[in-house]
Image (tube, rainbow, N blue to C red):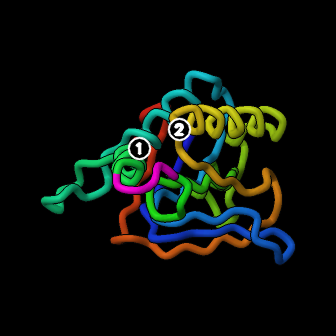
Amino acid sequence: MRAIIQRVKNAQVSVNGGIIGRIGKGLLVYLGVGKGDDETDAVFIADKIVNLRIFADSNEKMNLSVKDTALRLLRQSSGQVGSGQAGQILVISNFTLFGDCRKGRRPGFDLAAQPETAEKLYEKVVELVKAEGLEVQTGVFAAYMDVTASNDGPINFLLDSKRQF
């Protein structure tokens, strides 16, 4: 399983001209599922999404996770994490993360999981992240989506559950 994690000020996803997911400060996650991936990979990726310390603390050092920012907001506000201010996650399915561009000029997608398997594992990651108490928005699996974001930094990280990078 692979993911691109972007720290964003805000992000949204539209399908057929209608906005279906929108977040404030948090993470935009593009998630791809590869052949041979299973629930172990989903657990690894979900844990990294929730706990990767890529938000600045009071000393401007990357020392807080998206979960930490949500908890900080919860303590500072009336208790509503979903206020659109911090700690939100938008997860977008993206099979092209398994596109192989090493040969020729057209990517090959032999390493991507079949759609039925990929959708189940994509949904598993979303379920695991939601179980951590975070607000999670999603796109539509296998749909053509228009994703817009205002990057914060920009701060971007690549994850691979097989630890290839």
Circle 2 Cα neighbour tier, 10 Å, few/some/many (<14 / 14–19 / ≥20) = some
Residue 61 located left or right of residue 93: left
Against 71, is 107 above or below? below
Q: Give the range drawn in magenta.
A: 76-80
Of 108 and 7, which appears nearest the observer?
Answer: 7
Against 2, is 151 above or below? below
Which element type, helix, strand or loop, lies under badge 1?
helix
Q: Main secondary structure of the magenta part?
A: loop
Residue 42 is labelled as none
The residue to which callout 1 is attached is 67
Tags 1 and 2 touching, CB below 8 Å: yes
Q: Position of residue 61 (x, y in %)?
A: 17, 57
Q: Where is residue 85 in the image (x, y as percent from the top left)?
A: 46, 64
Quadrant of the rendered image containing residue 156: bottom left
Which element type, helix, strand or loop, lies under badge 2?
loop
Q: Which residue lies furthest to the left in this view?
A: 59
Of 37 and 44, which appears nearest the observer?
Answer: 44
At a point 78% along the width and 32% down the height, the residue shown is 117
At a point 63% along the width and 28% down the height, the residue shown is 37
Residue 133 is labelled as 2
Residue 77 colored magenta?
yes
Residue 35 located left or right of residue 43: right
